[in-house]
Image (cartoon, rainbow, N blue to C red):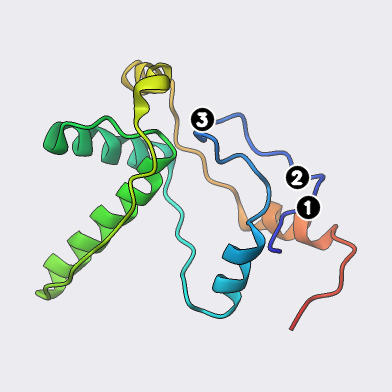
Amino acid sequence: MYTLGHDFVPAPIHAGGLRYHGAGVIVSQLLKDKLIEAVAHDNIEVFEAGVLFAKTEGIIPAPEANHGIATVIAEAQKCKEEGVSKTILFNLCGHGNFDMKAYDDYFDGKIVKHELSQEKIDASIAGLNTPEIP
C-alpha cells in the first residue's frame, strides 16, 4: 500500500472525505502496475470544477467527486489543445447536498490553495520502517 505513514498529519484543509494518509491496496496495485495514473489538484481548482459541473449539468457534486471532475476537465482541455477527440468516462460518486457548508466556505473565500512540498513528502516516506517493494 502506498502511504505517507501514520505520523503524517495533513494540513487543515477541506478535503471532502479524502484525508486518509494512504491509498487502498487495489488502487496502490493498479498504480504500481501502471494501469492508472495518480493526479492531484489544488482545492481551488477542485471547487471551480464542481461549480462548473453544477452550472452545466444541474447536479451539485460532492466535494470529493470534484477531484475527478477537475481531472476530466483537464483531460478535455488537453484534447482540445492537441486537436484530438476522445471519449472521457468518469463516475460521479455522490451529490453535494449534504456538504453545502464546503461550497459556502468556497464562495466565502475560506477554501485556500495548499501545496504539500516534496520535502515534506520525502520526510514522511523516510520515516517509514518498511523496505521498498520492487
Q: Quadrant of residue 17?
A: top right
Residue 11: x, y in percent?
A: 63, 35
User: Front-most of 26 and 33?
Assistant: 26
Q: Identify the mark at residue 8; answer none if there is no mark.
A: 2
Residue at the bottom extreme, as displayed:
134
From the image, tell me which residue sits under label 1: 5
CA–CA distance between discs 3 and 2? 17 Å
Q: Residue at x 52, y 35 (%)?
A: 15
Instruction: Residue under label 3, please give it.
Output: 14
User: How far is the residue under mark 3 from the one under mark 1?
Assistant: 20 Å
Mark 3 or 1, nearer chain start: 1
Total numbered badges shown on the rendered structure: 3
Q: Secondary structure at mark 2?
A: loop
Q: Residue at x 38, y 33 (%)?
A: 62
* Marks 3,1: beta carbons within 8 A: no
Amino acid type of the residue that numbered disc 1 sits on in the rendered structure: Gly
Label 1 CA crowd tier, 10 Å (few <14, some 14–19, many 20+): some
Q: Is residue 77 left or right of residue 27?
A: left
Count residues near mark 2 (Cα–Cα under 10 Å), then give few for <14, some for 14-19, many for 20+.
Answer: some
Which residue appears at 82% of the width and 44% of the height?
A: 7
Q: Determine whether label 3 and label 2 are within 8 Å by CB.
A: no
Q: Quadrant of residue 74?
A: bottom left
Q: Please tell me which residue is depicted at 15% across the width and 38% down the height of the picture.
A: 57
Quadrant that contains the N terminus: bottom right
Establish if 56 lies above or below 89.
above
Query: Three-letter amino acid code at disc 3?
Result: His
80 vs 103, left or right, is left
Provide residue 133's location: percent of width, then percent of height: 77, 78
